[in-house]
Structures are given as C-alpha cells and as structure tokens.
Image: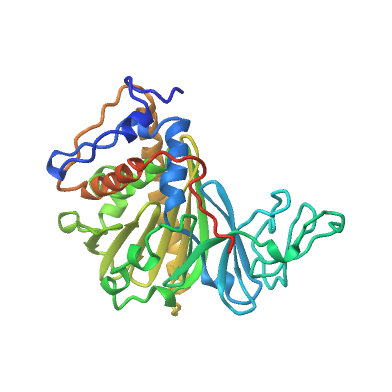
Amino acid sequence: MSDKIDGQTAMDLIAAPGSEALSKASALPAACYVGAEPYGVDLDRVIGRSWQLVAHRELLANPGDHVVDQVGRVPVLIVRGTDRQLRAFANVCRHRAGPLALCNGRGARALHCKYHGWTYNLDGRLRSAPEMQQAEDFKIEQIRLPKLQVGEWEGLVFVALDPQTPPLAEVYAGIAGRIEPIKLDELRFSRRQSYLIDCDWKVYVDNFLEGYHLPHVHPGLSKLLNYRAYDTELFPWSSLQSSPLDDAEQRYGSGEAYYYHVYPNVMLNILPGRLQTNRVVPLGPGRCRVDFDFYYANDDQIEARIAADARFSDEVQDEDIAICLAVQRGLESGQYEAGRLCPKRESGVWHFHNLLRRAYAEESLTGSSTTLDES
C-alpha cells in the first residue's frame, strides 16, 4: 500500500495549515492513517512526546518490583528502588543494547543484562561488568542507564520519553475532582483483556471519541445511556463524554457514565463502582493493540459485577472492532476524501485531530524524538 493517497503524502499533510473552527471542520485525510510514514511520525511526534500508561502501582509495590513495556520505539523498564522511589529507564544495556529484564518481576536486588551479564543497581548505576579488566579507561562508576520521566496519578503509573512533555498533573488535571465521590485509587484490579486489531491506532481513538455511532453500532449500550443528554466537554489535554445512566439498575446502577480520553491514547471509562482503562498501542502501519484493564470497588457484589461486565464488554468491543476494520478498509481504498465533522456530536474528534495537527506541525526530527537523561 502506497503512502500516497489522492496525490498527497502524510508529510504533505503534516506541513498543512492548522485546523478550522468546529462548525467548519473536516476530519483528518486518509493519508494520515495509511502506510509506514504516518506510523513512524506518530511514534516520534505523538507517542514519543506524551505520557504513556504502563502499569498500576500494585505491580510496583515493593523494592525490586519492576515492569517492562515498549513506548514508541523505546523498550522501557520501571522499577521500585531500595529507597522506595519509582524510576524508569530505557531497558537497554550500555554494553551492546541487551535487555535488563524480559518480563515483569518482583523483588529483584539488581538488574542483570540478559545478553552478557552486566549488572546495574536499582538506581541505574553499573555495578559490575564481567571480564572487562583489559578495557582501557573503562570506569564502571561513570556508566549508568538512561533515565526517563516517570509519574503516578490515581494509582496509575506513566512514563514519558521526552523531558519536554507537559507535567503529568497538568495533562490529567480536573478529572479526579469531576468524578467525586468516586476514588479511582481505591478500586481493585481485576483483569486485563487485550485485542489485536487491523486498523491504525487513530481509527480506534476516533471511534471512542464520539457517541454519534451509538444508535447504529451499539444497540445494547444505547439502551443504558441517554443519547439526548449525551454531552462532550473539551479540556487542554483531554475530553469527556458523559451521560446519565438510563434504566440501568440491573447492570450499572444509577449515576453517571464518564468516558474520558486523555491525549493521545488513553481512555478512562468510569461508571458506578468500576473503572476500565484502555490503552491503544500502535504496532505497525494499520495495526494496533488495545489493552483493557478492569478495576472494581471491593464489595459483596464484586464477583457478579465482574462476570456480567465481561460478557457485555466483549459484546461492545466486538461491535467496535468490526466497524474500525471497515473504516480502515475505507481509508485504504483511495476513495475517501476527508469528510465534514458533526459539530453537535464530534467535537471530541475535532479536539483530538487538532492536538495531532499541532504535533505534526512540529519541526522534523533529526533522529529519535527521545532525549535520554544519563545524569
């Protein structure tokens, strides 16, 4: 599949002028969703310059507990130090790029490269390097792992590759106060469900960002939400879709449904007694993975609630995946020109596309977008 659609390449679009007012706005062109070039730009200018959700703090409760992940182009390692501080590093040995950990773990006393056995303290300082005695001017004390930004919000742990990424507290500002009395950090992790989907990651995010499709794609979900009262609010780094829960006593109980999108690829689905986090991970041109983590209030109804939610969540996700696959085929067909957005229902899509356009308009990168801190 060529990166060029209707004579435009993704780089042409990146250099295009900024967005229009919502009442005049159109969606992103197809070339932003198709081929290797926009995928690479997204890794560098979007994923590589934003906070990425990697774990819940339960996985990092004690010294030596560690989590591995991939953020954009960079393998990352998050570890709880002996001083109980969280640290994040590139999971790349300073010798010959071997991994320091291959999977999540508990209680490690040190980080051992799986390639040649170089060993680092939990604070990233090199402790030993086997058989390096004959290497001239080789000083162990001068070698340490590159540090990345790490932050925690409501029990969720995030990593940012770029030191210029806005503060985590700024990106997630206002959410905890808006959903009170719900306390997200008091909910208990239940399970993870992951889906591999043959669509560009932005197709999935676009679909999340509007309720316009609810009556047409999600008949079951539409019965629980009040479509007429369904509202979207925009904030600097996030958007909120909310709705009263209609006739939902048997499934969710009374209250409000909050659907947050936090730029660029995190969703928080917050309903009475439960949280579902969604992270959309780009895997390649036209391919992504969506990780769903489920959290619940710990009460005497939790087991029944988990079982019922699992069945209903699978139904909704099957519907979303089917439409996203169809949209990706349409984008790749060469027959799509960017369509006008519905001002009443698609302000969240407009907001997301504006943030993308701003990221795409940044200066071309001269290498990796990641500036690693070796201090």
Residue for point 28% across, 69% down: 174
Q: How many marks?
A: 0
Find residue 16 and report its horizontal and vertical position in percent: 27, 33
| Observer able to see residue 363 | yes
Name the outermost residue toward the front: 137
Q: Is residue 109 left or right of residue 225?
A: right
Q: Indicate the quadrant containing the C terminus: top left, top right, bottom left or bottom right.
A: bottom right
Image point (35%, 43%), residue name: 362
Q: Nearer the viewer, residue 123 or 59?
A: 123
Outermost residue, top direction? 7
Query: Which quadrant would residue 26 be assigned to in this image?
Result: top left
**Residue 319 percent across, percent down from the top left:** 38, 44
335 or 3: which is nearer to us? 3
Q: Does residue 172 sit above or below 220 in this rendering? A: below
In this rendering, would 358 be left or right of 156? Answer: left
Q: Quadrant of residue 76?
A: bottom right
98 displayed left or right of 222: right
Report the residue at 64% width, 60% height from top.
145
Q: Is residue 212 above or below residue 188?
A: above
Image side of residue 278 versus residue 251, left or right: right
